[in-house]
Amino acid sequence: MKIAVTSASGKLGASIVKHLVRLIGKDNVIGIARTPEKAKHLGVEIRKGDYNNREDFNSALKGVDKVLLVSGMDEPQKRIEQHRNVIEAAKNNGVQKIVYTSIVGSETGTAFSPVVNSNRQTEEDVRNSGLQWIIGRNGIYIEPDLEYVDTYVKEGEIRNCAADGKCGYTSREELGFAYAQMLYNDKLNNQTYNLLGEAITQTQLAEYINEVYKTDLKYTSVGVDEYKQERQEALGEFMGTVIAGIYEGIKNGANEVPSDFESAAGRSHKAPLEMITDYYQTHQ
Ligand SMILES: NC(=O)c1ccc[n+]([C@@H]2O[C@H](COP(=O)([O-])OP(=O)(O)OC[C@H]3O[C@@H](n4cnc5c(N)ncnc54)[C@H](OP(=O)(O)O)[C@@H]3O)[C@@H](O)[C@H]2O)c1
């Protein structure tokens, strides 16, 4: 059985490849990457695949039984067409099953909603593909907050517009484990799974980080418009708007949804404190 993973040069794709290799061995795993040299270190066969180029995927998916499609990074409307290039190439190549990494989030009412909606459109395209399918809706990664701890320490605070909203975080490690199972285990087919852990507030997040990193961070809640302006000044209009939209969604409860992680992965999701501890121990 050959299983291919797109965006293998990225952090999520690499994690899925790593967990798949553990499950089915390196000879059965193919990494597909826009920039193949960035994925060579994974130790599996690497093929070229740029989402903008359907021909790349017509070649890359030859002889592949199952494919994992990692959601792209471009602006929403462009992503939909990019994902269709992979879905159509999978159909043309006789691929039997497609697994797609979608996202938990609010379809309406936040600046992040257009991104969520583009994921929902690809979900529909995947369900209508005629292939066996699985959709995972990923929670928010916890790693970016942990990569940012030094900045939080300099600023003395975690500051955003989530207020008391709860967020079910996950990690690329946890997702890698779950997606390997979802690719391998066909009993999970033709369903959508929310992949996230216990929901926590930003205040709890600060407390857990303090416990592991021995820091003294506090959480400061600011208004949505004020936060959007701050982020746009720091990150530019598009990314600043997206980040503010994500925290606005958390505030509104969009990231406090029931988790199906255990059904998909075959074990429970790690607790937030355990994810933070794992990350800390592997990044010292
Ligand atoms: N749940 C969350 O909290 C969260 C947060 C951020 C993003 N996301 C989503 O999750 C996805 C994966 O995240 P990540 O952590 O792996 O991101 P990452 O480490 O930044 O990797 C992004 C990957 O996308 C690839 N890529 C970009 N444009 C492409 C194209 N036109 N064709 C093929 N590949 C392309 C990059 O390839 P190159 O190596 O060639 O650049 C890279 O492999 C993102 O794309 C985004 O949709 C989720």
Image (cartoon, rainbow, N blue to C red):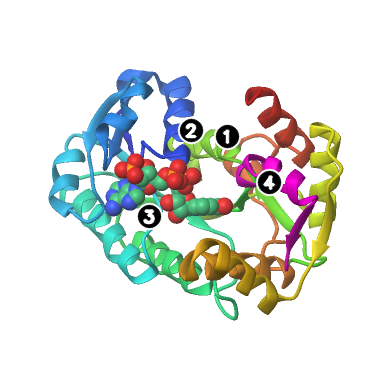
- For label 4, the residue is 151
Q: Which image quarter holds the C terminus?
A: top right
Q: Relative to 234, is 86 on the left or the right?
A: left
Q: Is residue 76 visible?
A: yes
Q: Are marks 2 and 1 in contact (CB under 8 Å)?
A: yes
Q: Position of residue 60 (x, y in %)?
A: 19, 39
Residue 9, placed above or below residue 78: above
- For label 1, the residue is 173
Q: Quadrant of residue 268?
A: top right
Residue labelled 4 has its Cβ within 8 Å of some atom of ligand 1: no
Q: Which mark is residue 72?
A: 3
Q: CA distance from mark 3 to mark 1?
A: 19 Å
Q: Nearer the viewer, mark 1 or mark 4?
A: 4
Q: CA distance from mark 4 to mark 2?
A: 26 Å
The amino acid pointed to by label 3 is Gly
Residue labelled 3 has its Cβ within 8 Å of some atom of ligand 1: yes
The amino acid pointed to by label 1 is Glu
Q: CA distance from mark 3 to mark 4?
A: 27 Å
Q: Residue at x 19, y 51 (%)?
A: 89
Residue 231 magenta-highlighted:
no
Q: Residue at x 34, y 19 (%)?
A: 43
Q: Relative to 10, is 2 on the left or the right?
A: left
Q: Mark 3 falls on what kind of element?
A: loop
Q: Mark 1 falls on what kind of element?
A: helix
Considering the whole magenta stretch, tell me its main secondary structure: helix
Q: Relative to 23, is 161 on the left or the right?
A: right
Label 4 environment density (alpha carbons within 10 Å; few <14, some 14–19, many ≥20) = few
- For label 2, the residue is 15
